[in-house]
Image: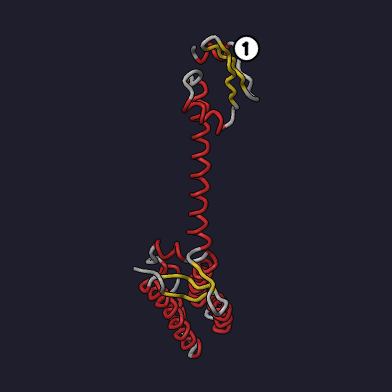
Amino acid sequence: MSAHECVEKDGGINRGGLKVKVKAASEYYWCSIRLTFPGYLLWSLVSDECGNNYFRERCMRSVCSVVVVLLLFVTGGLIYKFLVQGSVEEASDGRAAIQLTHSEKDLVLTEMRSFLQSVQAITVGLSSDDMDAVALNARTVGMAAQQGVPVSLMGKLPLEFKRLGVDTHKKFDLLALNAEQLGDSMATLKELSVLMQNCVACHEVYRLDAVLQE
């Protein structure tokens, strides 16, 4: 008996659930099919009497829908891990310990030391009212200095850490611009004070642990 004949004996398809009366070897039995993903998936795989294209198509649509949902879920998890959470564990001192390789930790610390060196050079420039030196040293750690950070490292850094880093680079660029255009050492000193709050906030919340294999 074909699948369409099987369906026609019951007068069509009932979307809430289908009961098809099938005659075989002088006796009747009921073929009950629930039109849900588990029901017609199993039925389409094992049924010889009623395994027709209609239900197989319905099954494939549901399989595709489930696969799409799973892919979206996995993709969303990866995006959250890469952009927001990063590779972080709770440290013994209460801070968030960013889990890095030794070379990655060295790279981040090198950038932090360059911040400190620029701050020291800026204060020297301010003390002698040399605004050209202030602008020069501030610009060396502006946004241009961030271009060489590997993508693999960026994925391990939590979102707030990255936000603080980008904001600090931008503030150095703004400080350099204002030092050149305004030449006001007191205003620049105030800018530097605000900028340093980012450094304090970062070190209060985060630490770097070199625990991962290269």
At 50% from the left edge and 73% from the top edge, which residue is drawn? 97
Query: Residue 32: x percent and y percent?
Result: 59, 23
Which residue occupies the foreground of this view, 106 or 191?
Answer: 106
Which quarter of the image is occupied by the C terminus?
A: bottom left
Q: Extreme top residue here?
A: 26
For label 1, the crowd category at 10 Å Cα-Cα, with few meaning under 14, some 14 to 19 and many 20 or more, is few
**53 displayed left or right of 18:** left
Q: Extreme bottom residue here?
A: 128
Label 1 belongs to which residue? 11
At 51% from the left edge and 53% from the top edge, which residue is drawn? 77
Q: Is residue 23 visible to us here?
A: yes
Q: Is residue 140 visible to us here?
A: no
Relative height, residue 55 to residue 114 (above, below): above
At 52% from the left edge and 51% from the top edge, which residue is drawn? 76
Query: Residue 201: x percent and y percent?
Result: 57, 76
Q: How many labels, in total?
A: 1
Which residue occupies the foreground of this view, 190 or 40?
Answer: 40
